[in-house]
Image: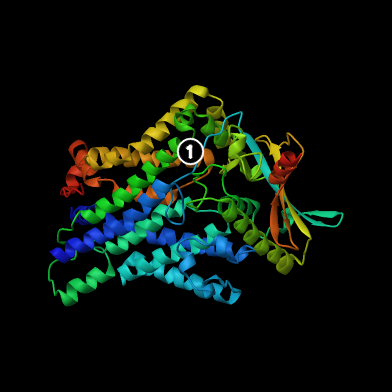
């Protein structure tokens, strides 16, 4: 029973401190991604910056930040690793979260300058920045521990927390909702209005096998033959965009993707479902039930994209997982299952 | 209490305003994005192209695919998004808020100046001219037509010349 009580305390603490759990896991994942990106930057022959390769953030940095001299590599990796771990465990947590966000702005900014905007890390970087600034992200941290037993001289248990304002949690939820909503708007805005819903764009990407092509045949550029001649001034093809890649290499999963891409009904349903899902992002604010349904759908959405297109969005899934109202789920389970009843979890909704 | 409210409002605005800005203007610059992934339309009738770059010295031309300095997809996406730009006035593939002939010519010159420097410093290659071509292909990358010259960069006088514009002005003159 004692063990069960302890287990209940740990579970209760974790589910009621979602921003601290998110801080711990996301800092580690983002730090790892930044280091991997640094390896890539050092591998590229032309990683030098020039005026057209800069983002709004990297254009603020002095030229020395673009000198990727091999002798700096180890130092940079150590800095990123130390900052990520310190941010994760919450040692000088807010400062390290802030530095981690800036490191991400910097390294992924350089990577965007080389050629590709990393959409996997755009939302996680903003969430890390938010965690550095909002209340509630440092409750489970070394900093809080030190503060509690030294400055505050609080004799109560570590697991007793004062109430945290909800705006920090809601702000991070807003960042998630805005990201999905914007993706839905972009499909309608640039995808020939509701034509995107016919599923042909999705079908194209499900059929795409980017890894098959030799150097020189990889990157497709889209031309718009409907552009009137008087509106063409750079070229006669009317180039309007580049395609994205499908990185899935598993034969079984590509076979499923091919099946879906050949089924018009499924494709249309998936296209409509995707856009509706994205446009309905703000339902997360109706109540915890809607929030949970939406966030679980988001995780499934990313898992299916990962399976069919090889794009994992692991960090998005982690963010969604941490923002779920686990009290609601455990409350439901404790009503239905004996084991959860024994845990006697107290309710503290993050709604 | 008042200080807390000011702080809260400042943090909310700091995090949300850039997102609203990129969403409204349909641009992206890390980490702010209008989330353009798959935000375009492709069907069976859509024209697809591969870009090619070719260094030219007198009668000899060299395919530059092995001398891009970075993976091909990075090179082409950078070239398209940050340098060449979309024909559409609003494009999710860019960080530009506006477009003009002067700005386009300037970007092309800046890009090719940087690229010719990379060719010289990293590969010890120099050319009189760099041709920029496009090949019309299908999704399986099978060519549907011969490569077409889109334009060329004159490395001596450091200017980009659009083949289409030349053709247009010649037609007008005739």
Report whether residue A260 is seen.
yes
Which residue is disc 1 drawn over?
Answer: A190
Q: Quadrant of residue A50?
A: bottom right
For the residue pair A234 and A4, the one nearer the viewer reads as: A234
Q: Residue at x 56, y 61 (%)?
A: A53
Q: Is residue B110 left or right of residue A311?
A: right
Q: Where is residue A66? Give x, y as percent.
A: 55, 70
Q: Where is residue A338? Give x, y as percent.
A: 20, 40
Q: Is residue A25 left or right of residue A198?
A: left
Is residue A209 positioned above or below A66 on the image? above
What colour scheme was applied to this rendering of the protein? rainbow
Q: Residues within 10 Å of mark 1 (few under 14, many from 20)?
A: many
Extreme right residue here? B59
Q: Secondary structure at mark 1?
A: helix
Q: Quadrant of residue A41?
A: bottom right
Circle 1 chain: A
For the residue pair A118 and A349, the one nearer the viewer reads as: A118
Q: Where is residue B99? Give x, y as percent.
A: 53, 50
Q: Is residue B82 left or right of residue A5?
A: right
């Amino acid at each position: 029973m004692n063990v069960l009580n302890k287990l209940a305390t740990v579970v209760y603490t974790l589910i009621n401190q979602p921003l601290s759990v998110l801080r711990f896991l996301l800092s580690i994942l983002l730090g790892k991604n930044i280091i991997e990106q640094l390896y890539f930057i050092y591998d590229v022959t032309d990683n030098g910056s020039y005026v057209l390769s800069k983002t709004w953030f990297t254009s603020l940095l002095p030229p020395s930040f673009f000198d990727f001299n091999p002798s700096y590599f180890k130092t940079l990796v150590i800095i990123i690793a130390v900052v990520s771990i310190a941010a994760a465990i919450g040692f000088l947590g807010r400062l390290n979260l802030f530095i981690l966000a800036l490191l991400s702005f910097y390294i992924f900014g350089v990577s965007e300058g080389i050629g590709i905007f990393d959409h996997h890390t755009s939302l996680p970087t903003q969430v890390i920045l938010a965690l550095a600034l909002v209340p509630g992200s440092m409750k489970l941290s070394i900093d809080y521990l030190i503060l509690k037993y030294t400055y505050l001289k609080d004799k109560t248990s570590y697991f007793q927390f004062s109430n945290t304002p909800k705006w920090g949690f809601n702000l991070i939820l807003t960042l998630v909702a805005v990201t999905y909503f914007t993706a839905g708007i972009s499909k309608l805005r640039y995808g020939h209005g509701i034509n995107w819903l016919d599923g042909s764009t999705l079908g194209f990407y499900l059929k795409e096998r980017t890894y098959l092509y030799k150097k020189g045949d990889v990157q497709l550029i889209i031309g718009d033959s409907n552009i009137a001649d008087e509106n063409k001034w750079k070229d006669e093809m009317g180039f309007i965009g580049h395609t994205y890649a499908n990185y899935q290499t598993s034969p079984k999963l590509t076979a499923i993707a091919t099946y879906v891409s050949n089924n018009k009904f499924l494709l249309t349903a998936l296209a409509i479902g995707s856009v509706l899902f994205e446009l309905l992002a703000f339902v997360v604010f109706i109540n915890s039930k809607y929030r949970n349904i939406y966030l679980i759908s988001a995780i499934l959405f990313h898992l299916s994209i990962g399976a069919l297109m090889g794009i994992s969005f692991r960090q998005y899934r982690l963010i969604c997982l941490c923002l779920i109202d686990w009290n609601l789920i455990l409350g439901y389970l404790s009503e239905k299952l004996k084991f959860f009843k024994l845990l006697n979890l107290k309710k503290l909704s993050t709604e | 209490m008042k200080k807390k409210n000011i702080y809260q409002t400042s943090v909310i605005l700091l995090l949300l305003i850039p997102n609203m800005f990129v969403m409204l203007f349909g641009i992206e610059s890390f980490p702010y994005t209008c989330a353009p992934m798959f935000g375009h339309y492709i069907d069976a009738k859509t024209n697809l192209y591969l870009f090619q770059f070719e260094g030219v010295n007198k009668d000899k031309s060299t395919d530059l695919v092995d001398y891009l300095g970075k993976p091909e997809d990075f090179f082409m996406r950078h070239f398209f998004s940050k340098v060449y730009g979309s024909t559409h006035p609003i494009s999710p593939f860019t960080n530009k808020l506006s477009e003009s002939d002067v700005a386009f010519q300037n970007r092309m010159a800046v890009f090719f100046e940087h690229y010719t420097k990379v060719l010289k410093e990293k590969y010890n290659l120099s050319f009189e001219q760099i041709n920029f071509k496009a090949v019309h292909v299908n999704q399986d990358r099978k060519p549907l037509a011969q490569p077409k010259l889109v334009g060329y960069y004159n490395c001596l006088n450091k200017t980009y010349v659009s083949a289409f514009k030349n053709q247009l002005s010649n037609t007008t003159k005739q």
